[in-house]
Image: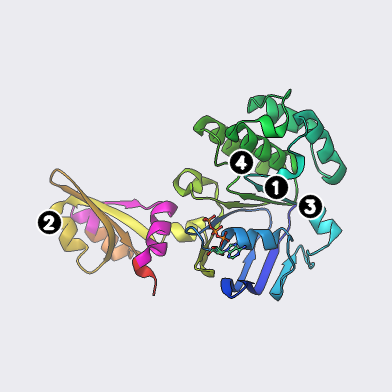
Amino acid sequence: MSYSIEVNGLTVHYKNFKALDQLNFKLSPGKIHGILGRNGAGKTTLLTYLASFHKAKHGTIVIDGEDPFENERILQGTSFIYEKDNTYDYDKIDKIIKGMLYFRPYFDEAYARELVKRFKIPTNKSADQLSKGQYSALQVAIGLASRTPLTIFDEAYLGMDAPARELFYKEILLEQERHPRTILFSTHLVSEMEYLFDEVLIIDNGKVLLQETSEQLLEKGFSITGAKEDVEAFTKTLEVIYEEMLGGTKSVMVYGTLPKQEQREAVELDLEIGSLSINNLFIHLTKEEERT
Ligand SMILES: Nc1ncnc2c1ncn2[C@@H]1O[C@H](COP(=O)(O)OP(=O)(O)OP(=O)(O)O)[C@@H](O)[C@H]1O
């Protein structure tokens, strides 16, 4: 089961500061969404509203067809997983897992225990005795095993080492096949996680900068590599966002699409055309110089 999300005109103020400004977007159910943005862009603010921690004062949020605020059905189906959750700090891991069964109707206890084992989380300790990475792993294990139709991970994996993160990503993809749900990831580990995203929402300065499927986004840029002079001549009128030299070979990243005719010309010039990563495009789209 998975929830759809529709946000219309959402504006959020912290006193006089406007953290979110007229957000409008829809998130498709059953997909993995990367919620990207620079530090302070408004990601956590947005995610806490989607998790119904607060009532929207300006604008509306509709989740699975209903206003989610104080809505028991939607709340039971929503997990918000973040770096530090103080609700169960003094409890032993076993008690925390058992406790989930009371308010998470889809929670799979056996799967949670399997994950705890695979993440090597010591079960004889309480949550506040865990290392930072172990605590994060516990958080993501709970998020995975909760099987909530809307599962939000807000930088929950920060302390986890690379092998633990790799295990988490693999489980996300397996779980998405077994029990598809709507998953939201806010992350700064864009290059590492981008292969997981079906769709990407970029927030910049409290506004939606773009929302695309990963496929559409990847069509917005390309790399071009070849002899220095040929690359420079070919890209003279294009928007080059990055360039590097490797001996006599030049490689550049271009923002924009390349029509078929130009692709053929590039091949004739012996230039190699490649794709850009979502991370490259994200960096380019949100860099300071672009801001007014
Ligand atoms: N309680 C608060 N009072 C005042 N301003 C706040 C408060 N919480 C957040 N902000 C401001 O709102 C903006 C958005 O913050 P938010 O935490 O949503 O950003 P973020 O995109 O999650 O950032 P990061 O990637 O650094 O975690 C920031 O400018 C932040 O300083």
Q: Position of residue 33 (x, y in %)?
A: 59, 55
Considering only order in the chain, which callout, 1 or 3, is on the residue closer to the N terminus? 3
**Precedes in sequence: disc 2 or disc 4:** 4
N-terminal-most mark, 4 or 1 = 4
Residue 89, which numbered label? none
Work out whether residue 291 or residue 62 is closer to the camera in this orientation and state it: 291
Q: What is the quadrant of residue 64 in the picture?
A: bottom right
Mark nearest the camera among 3 and 1 is 3
User: Residue 164: percent from the left, percent from the top?
Assistant: 56, 32
Q: Which residue is mark 2?
A: 229
Range covered by the magenta-colored residues: 266-288
- Give the mark nearer the N terminus: 3 vs 2: 3
Q: Amino acid at mark 3?
A: Gly
Could you tell me the amino acid type at mark 1? Pro
Between the C-alphas of marks 1 and 2, the distance is 49 Å
The part of the image, by quadrant, that contains residue 259 is bottom left
Crowd class of label 2 (few under 14; some 14 to 19; many from 20; radius 10 Å): few
Cα distance, mark 4 to mark 3?
20 Å
Where is residue 5, by image quadrant? bottom right
Q: Which residue is labeled 1 in the image?
A: 180
Spatial separation of the CA atoms under disc 2 and disc 4 = 44 Å
Q: Give the number of the disc on residue 173.
A: 4
The image position of residue 96, as x and y in percent, is: 78, 35
**Which quadrant of the rendered structure holds the C terminus?**
bottom left
Q: Which residue is mark 3?
A: 77
Q: Residue 17: x and y, percent? A: 56, 72
Of badges 4 and 3, the one in the foreground is 3
Q: Is 49 above or below relative to 169? A: below
- Give the residue type that dot 2 points to: Glu
Q: Quadrant for ligand 1?
A: bottom right
User: Residue at the location (69% across, 34% down)?
Assistant: 128
